[in-house]
Amino acid sequence: MNATVTHDRTEETIEAKAHWFRSLTLTERMDMLCAFTELLLMTNPRIVEQRNAQPIEGRVLVLELEGK
């Protein structure tokens, strides 16, 4: 994991975040997944009880290939 710290807003783009994530090893990626999961469960422990979640209109953009 890159240990440098920067305060440049240009490094907060989706592309920069994807580049950073791709630079992680598989172990580091799994550690991040576990950390995010633990954060989610601490914030909302009842999330595991929710079933058949539906997307909120306008919150998620679904892209499809033409001709499919």
Image (cartoon, helix red, strand yellow):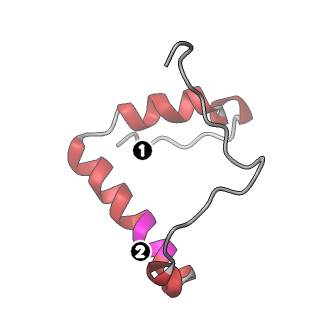
Disc 1 from disc 2: Cα separation: 22 Å
Instruction: Give the residue type that dot 1 points to.
Output: Ala
Q: Is residue 38 magenta?
A: yes
Q: Nearer the viewer, residue 43 or 16?
A: 43
Relative placement, left or right, of 30 versus 48 is: left
> How busy is the neighbourhood of tag 1: few (under 14 within 10 Å), some, or many (20 plus)?
few
For the residue pair 28 and 42, the one nearer the viewer reads as 42
Q: Nearer the viewer, residue 57 or 48?
A: 57
Q: Is residue 12 left or right of residue 37?
A: right
Magenta stretch, main secondary structure, is helix
Q: Residue at x 56, y 82 (%)?
A: 44
Read off the magenta span.
36-40
Q: Residues within 10 Å of mark 2 (few under 14, many from 20)?
A: few
Identity of the amino acid at label 2?
A: Glu
- Residue extending farthest left: 27
Quarter location, residue 16: top right
User: For numbered disc 2, what is the local secondary structure?
Assistant: helix
